[in-house]
Structures are given as C-alpha cells and as structure tokens.
Amino acid sequence: MKRTIAQLAGLATLVTGLTGGAAMAQDYPYRDITTAVVWGAGGGTDTINRMIMAEMEKHLPVSINVINQTGGVAGSNGMVYVMNQPDDGYTLVGLSESNVTAAVQGGWDKKFDYWYPFIVGGSPDLISVPANSPYDTLESLVEAAKAAPGTIPAAASGAGSIHHLNLLALQNGSGAEFKFVPYKGSAPGQEAAIAGEVALVVTSLAEQAALIEGGQLKPLAMLTPDPVEIAGTTVPSAFSIYDGLDKYLPLKQAIGFAVHNSASDDVKTALGAAFEQAIASETVAEWAAANNYDVGGQYGPEAQKLFSTLESTFAYTLQELGAATVDPATLGIEKP
C-alpha cells in the first residue's frame, strides 16, 4: 500500500518520539562518567580515586574516566569546575577533607553540604626531611626554626590543605615558625623536598611510604598520637615530644569523591550501590593494607555529617591560627 508524504512524515515523527522517550527513560548510568580530582596526579586523593573508580566500574555498565582539575584555593578550581557541570551524576569531584577550607579562604562561597560525598578512607600525616638533611630529630628541626623564624622552607601541599593545617598546628604547639611554600598537591611537595627546594614536607604516610623505604625521605615524627614502624625504624609521635600538640592535633584525612547533593535519588542510589560493593571487596582491603590507608566506607548523610564536623573544625582552626580570610560564621559554619 502506498503512503502519502504526510503519512510518512507522521510515522517518522512518531518513531522519533518513541525512541527519544526511550532514550530519556534509560537508567543511570547509560554513558561514561568523569571524575575530576581537585589535587594533582600522583597524590593521595588522585591515587585513591583512580583505585576506587576502577573497582566501582566492575559494578556499573559504563567506564569512569579520571582527570585532574587542580589549582585555586584549597582545591576550589576543581570544585567550581564540577559545580558548573549538570547535576546528572556524569561528572563527579574527587576530593578530600582539605577542600572544606576553600570557603573560609575565599576559594568559593558555599558550605560543603553542597556535595553528597563518599569517603574511601585516609592515612595519617607525618613530617619528613630529605635523606641528606642535617636534621635527624623533630627537636633539632624545631630548634633551628626557632633560631631563625620564617626562614626554613616547608612544603605542605596547598594553602588550607590538611597538611598545611598540620604544619600550622605543629608550629603553634612547638613554638617554631617555618616558611610555608604551597604546592599543587602532595607529590610536587615531596619532590621539592627530595630536590632540596624545601627543608621539610608534611604529607601522609601513604604518600611518603615508598620514598621513605627508598631512602629518599627521612621521617622525623608522626602527627598523630601513635608511633609507626616503617623501613625498619620507628617513627615517634610528635605528641610524645611536645605536650601542647594535643590542643590542635590530630587532624585526619577523609579522601573520596562526591556528586552534587541536588542529584536525583536514582543517581545517588546507583553510585551508592557500586561504592558499597567496591569498598567491601578484597581488592580495596588489600590495597589499603599495602598502602597504609584506613578504609572508611561512609557516604550520603553519614559522610555529610563527618564532613560537616571537619568543616567546622578546620574553619575555626584556620581562623584561630590567623589563616582564614572569611569569617566562617558568615558562611553559616557553626563553631565546634
């Protein structure tokens, strides 16, 4: 039977409408996801995100591509980049506890509850020096800094990172004053220490472990209450050296990723299911043990509550230490 041009056009419109509706009805995710990590390649946040995304891919019908969007204040460039993407769950942000200070440092103007976060875990911070450094103990380094305030260069990632806060806390608790030199992540800061550009570096045990075992960095003290055994030596706790540190430390990591809190329930449910399966896997457990990480596994409201506490603690710690440019109270951040 012959059809008129009008009838054929009508059929085409009907088919287009049906196929378009079917496309719109596809379950999330039906195309690849991108995770934009706010810190540099090779650092702790980058490494954890690449690991967890590879594991989550096993439980999703799509691939997850990891990129780096660095710079700004406390990782603000990467957060702003993801904020400006649709809240459809196809662009995630790879972040850490250090990003909670972006607002009080003027990096952006939002509280951290803008995000719906997933916490993979974290690793304790320590202070180390180049292998050929004349400083063999934390006490000798601190005494040198006291003798020449503000002259000994120290790397601790970017301004407002947990490593920077730990450096500030160490200064406040010991009476020393170092010359803070910011870098776009932990890996560049550690490389600067090895190259002799800075005299010391504060990053996590997970990030430093290979460099310590390889004889490139010399650990002086853990910035947590417990000592650690690594490379055949005991790294003492700074708490046992300076009594005043317990007023400011420990400040611990919470590394993972997030989606817009405004994303749909379907997006949050799909990501949550894949995340739960990934976190429970032997792959993640073995990776964490081998790389000096403690596994978290919190997400959604539970993780938001943890980040809210971190945001409050970090914001007012920065304010107390004179490193905040914005009053946290004006942002609606409650004092701890």
Image (cartoon, rainbow, N blue to C red):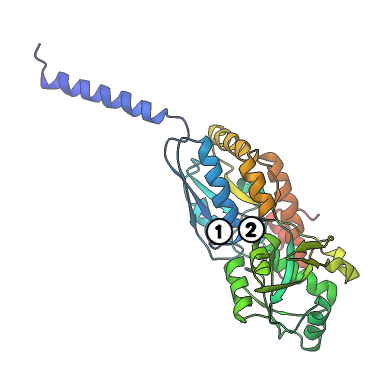
Q: In this view, which residue lies farthest toward the bottom? A: 148
Which element is circle 1 on?
loop
The circle on residue 38 is 1
> How many residues crowd around disc 1 within 10 Å: few (fewer than 14), some, or many (20 or more)?
many
- x, y percent for residue 334: 76, 53
Residue at 52% in and 38% down: 58
Outermost residue on the right side: it is 243
* Callout 2–callout 1 Cβ contact below 8 Å: yes
Relative placement, left or right, of 47 versus 296 is left
**Could you tell whether 318 is left or right of 157 in the image?**
right
User: In the image, 235: left or right of 216?
Assistant: right
Q: Circle 2 sits in a helix, a strand or a loop, which is it?
A: helix
Q: Quadrant of the N terminus?
A: top left
The three-letter code of the residue at mark 2 reads Asn
Mark 2–mark 1 distance (CA, rounded to whole Å): 9 Å
Residue 11, position as x, y percentages in the image: 21, 20
